[in-house]
């Protein structure tokens, strides 16, 4: 009887701890979303970023190329449920002078690069390596679960690590600055390796309250891949349809 009562007590204690952990994790995410601009951050509709980028050789760490004109256009879909798959619409162009280093786009169905249309299987793998941050906007939605991971330091700042699990079971780690609530870290397993992003140099847009990390560093399996410095941010503004129009088959 005592053994049975003890097992019941332990089970109840574990259940309470789990509930408390989930509640704490939710509090951290809620506070982080508010810190980043609240509703403007959760449902921005569109995002346009302009800046520069540096790309590194994975074997040597040497600079492989630099883009003095690096641009991204995003059109979001509210209610995203897949953490590491393509969603909404996106286009990225990296240029040095008049020379295009690379281009990639997605119109909701088709993925393309400067070389033309990308086959779906290849495209799915590509986006699985790159999409992940935006799922934080859905983290409080039904079907998602949140849990606490061990806290750590990121760029000299204490962060609370939260594990966000989407309805398909895909996990993403988000690191929230314990003082500001800003997202300083994100990580997930990808086909290319363990992908991490480190965010810094935050700026708040005066009208919307949106907070943007101007500095973003991307790593795979601990090796730096590229770094981006965003210098211009626009949210919620209409984007020309042509931006997300893929090239015609056979066109150059």
Image (cartoon, grey):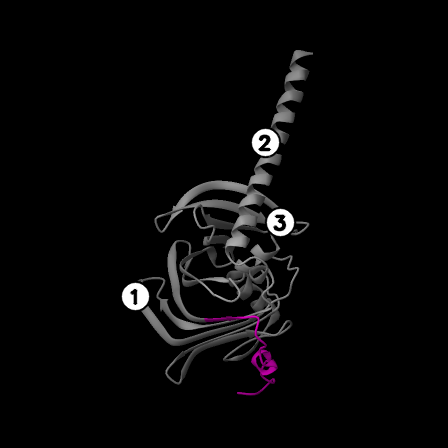
Label 3 sits on residue: 169
Q: Are marks 2 and 1 in contact (CB under 8 Å)?
A: no
Which one is earlier in the sequence, the residue at label 1 or at label 3? 1
Look at mark 1 in the image and give the residue it sits on: 62
Residue 175 screen position, x and y as percent: 47, 49
Measured as percent of width and height from the top left, residue 250 is found at 58, 86
| Count of marks placed on residues | 3
Classed neighbour count for the residue bearing mark 3: other residues with Cα under 10 Å, few (<14), some (14–19), many (≥20): few
Report the quarter where the N terminus lies: top right
Instruction: Say left or right for 3 vs 129.
Output: right
Q: Which residues are magenta?
A: 233-252
Task: For residue 8, say whether it is visible.
Answer: yes
Query: Of all residues shown, which one is farthest toward the bottom?
Result: 251
| Magenta stretch prevailing secondary structure | loop
Distance CA(mark 1)–CA(mark 3):
37 Å
Distance of label 2 from label 3 (alpha carbons)? 22 Å
Rounded to the nearest whole Å, what is the CA distance between mark 2 and mark 1? 47 Å
Asked if residue 132 can be seen in this view, the reply is no
Q: Position of residue 43 (x, y in %)?
A: 61, 63
- Does label 2 or label 1 sit earlier along the sequence? 2
* Element on which disc 1 rests: loop
Q: Is residue 80 above or below residue 146?
A: below
Within 10 Å of the Cα at label 1, are there few (<14), some (14-19), or many (20+) other Cα atoms?
Answer: few
Where does label 2 land, which residue? 17
**Residue at the (67%, 16%) spot, across then down:** 5
Q: Residues within 10 Å of mark 2 (few under 14, many from 20)?
A: few
- Frontmost residue, 20 versus 54: 20
């Amino acid at each position: 009887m005592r053994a049975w009562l003890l097992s019941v007590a332990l089970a109840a204690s574990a259940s309470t701890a789990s509930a408390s952990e989930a509640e704490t994790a939710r509090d951290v995410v809620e506070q982080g979303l508010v810190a980043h601009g609240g509703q403007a951050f959760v449902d921005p509709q569109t995002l346009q970023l302009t800046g520069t980028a540096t790309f590194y050789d994975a074997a040597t760490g040497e600079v492989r190329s630099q883009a003095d004109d690096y641009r991204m256009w995003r059109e979001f879909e509210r209610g995203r449920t897949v953490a590491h798959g393509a969603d909404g619409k996106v286009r990225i162009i990296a240029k040095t002078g008049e020379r295009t280093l690379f281009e990639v786009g997605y119109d909701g169905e088709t993925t393309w690069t400067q070389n033309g249309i990308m086959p779906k299987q290849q495209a799915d793998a590509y986006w699985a390596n790159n999409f992940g941050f935006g799922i934080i906007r859905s983290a409080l939605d039904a079907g998602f679960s949140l849990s606490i991971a061990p806290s750590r330091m990121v760029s000299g700042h204490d962060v609370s690590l939260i594990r966000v699990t989407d309805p398909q079971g895909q996990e993403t780690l988000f690191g929230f600055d314990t003082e500001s609530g800003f997202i300083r870290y994100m990580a997930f397993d990808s086909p290319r390796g363990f992908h991490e992003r480190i965010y810094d140099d935050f700026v708040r847009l005066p009208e919307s309250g949106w907070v943007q990390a101007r500095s973003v560093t991307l790593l795979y399996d601990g090796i730096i891949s590229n770094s981006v410095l965003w210098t211009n941010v626009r949210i919620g503004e209409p984007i020309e349809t042509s931006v997300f129009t893929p090239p015609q088959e056979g066109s150059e």
